[in-house]
């Protein structure tokens, strides 16, 4: 399960509208809004460099944060949108949604592969081809998994791992209904060439 929820520190923004947002940007802040949760929207500012550090770290839109704003109670939020300047691509506004522990949300969860050393197909020179390094799951905000685990023990060349083969954490379910592929083990190039030659020879004999 997920570890400690990271803090995200912001300041309450006085005033709303384009004028207040422009003033925030002049002072090297990125304006934002926190909405939902049965509470009035809260205008906030985040320090530009602080926000950029989080954006560059990755997974910003799929990370649950503990939002800390002086004068307000801490609240769990998830970013739902980062608006960017159309020319420079820099963030100019962020939208956050408040969450309760029981809220259901969709997040991309990383896939972790274990027991590669116990996969006969990999020992024979096969290659693990990861089709989906992360999978979108519907999860409970208070119980977000760090990752899902794919056990490669006993896997042979040609084996395909589907989402239905994976034991998902309690309460989590894929957002895609079909039994999609996560990974497969392909034959080494030398073996594939030999198999292709054998198939061609059989075809020639049958002709």
Image (cartoon, rainbow, N blue to C red):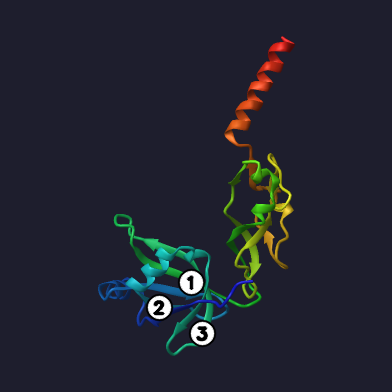
Image quadrant assignment for residue 126: top right
Q: Nearer the viewer, residue 85 or 141?
A: 141
How crowded pointer 1 is (Cα within 10 Å; few <14, some 14-19, many 20+) is rated as many
Badge 2 or badge 1: first in the primary sequence = 2
Q: Tell us which disc is closer to us: 3 or 2.
A: 3
- The residue wearing badge 3 is 74
What residue lies at 47% left-to-right and 66% top-to-bottom?
A: 60
Q: CA distance from mark 2 to mark 1?
A: 10 Å
Badge 3 or badge 2: first in the primary sequence = 2
* Disc 3 and disc 2 in contact, CB within 8 angstroms: no
The relative height of residue 33 versus residue 174 in the rendered view (above or below) is below
Circle 3: element type: loop
Outermost residue to the bottom: 71
* Disc 2 and disc 1 in contact, CB within 8 angstroms: yes
What residue lies at 38% left-to-right and 71% top-to-bottom?
A: 51
How far across and down, in percent of the image, does residue 133 sit? 57, 53
Q: Nearer the viewer, residue 119 or 9?
A: 119
Q: Nearer the viewer, residue 50 or 30?
A: 50
The relative height of residue 207 versus residue 175 in the rendered view (above or below) is above
Image quadrant assignment for residue 88: bottom left
How crowded pointer 3 is (Cα within 10 Å; few <14, some 14-19, many 20+) is rated as some
**Mark carried by residue 44:** 2
Q: Tell us which disc is closer to us: 1 or 3.
A: 3
Side of 90 where 146 appears, left or right? right
Residue 48 seen? no
Side of 56 where 37 appears, left or right? right
How far across and down, in percent of the image, does residue 76 sit? 54, 78
Badge 1 or badge 3: first in the primary sequence = 3
- The residue wearing badge 1 is 96
Q: CA distance from mark 1 to mark 3?
A: 13 Å
């Amino acid at each position: 399960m997920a570890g400690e929820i990271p803090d995200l520190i912001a300041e309450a923004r006085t005033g709303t509208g384009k004028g207040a947002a422009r003033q925030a940007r002049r002072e090297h802040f990125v304006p934002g809004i926190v909405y939902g949760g049965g509470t009035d929207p809260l205008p906030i500012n985040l320090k530009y460099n602080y926000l950029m550090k989080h954006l560059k770290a990755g997974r910003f839109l799929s990370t649950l944060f503990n939002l800390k704003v002086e004068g307000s109670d801490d609240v769990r939020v998830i970013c739902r949108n980062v608006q960017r300047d159309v020319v420079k691509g820099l963030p100019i506004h962020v939208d956050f949604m408040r969450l309760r522990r029981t809220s259901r949300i969709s997040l991309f969860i990383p896939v972790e592969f274990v027991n590669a050393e116990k996969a006969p197909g990999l020992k024979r020179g096969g290659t693990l081809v990861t089709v989906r390094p992360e999978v979108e799951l519907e999860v409970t905000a208070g119980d977000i998994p760090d990752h899902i685990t794919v056990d490669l023990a006993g896997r042979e060349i040609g084996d395909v791992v589907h989402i239905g083969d994976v034991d998902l954490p309690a309460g989590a379910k894929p957002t895609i209904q079909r039994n999609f592929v996560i990974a497969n083990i392909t034959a080494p190039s030398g073996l594939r060439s030999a198999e292709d030659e054998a198939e061609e020879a059989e075809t020639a004999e049958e002709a």
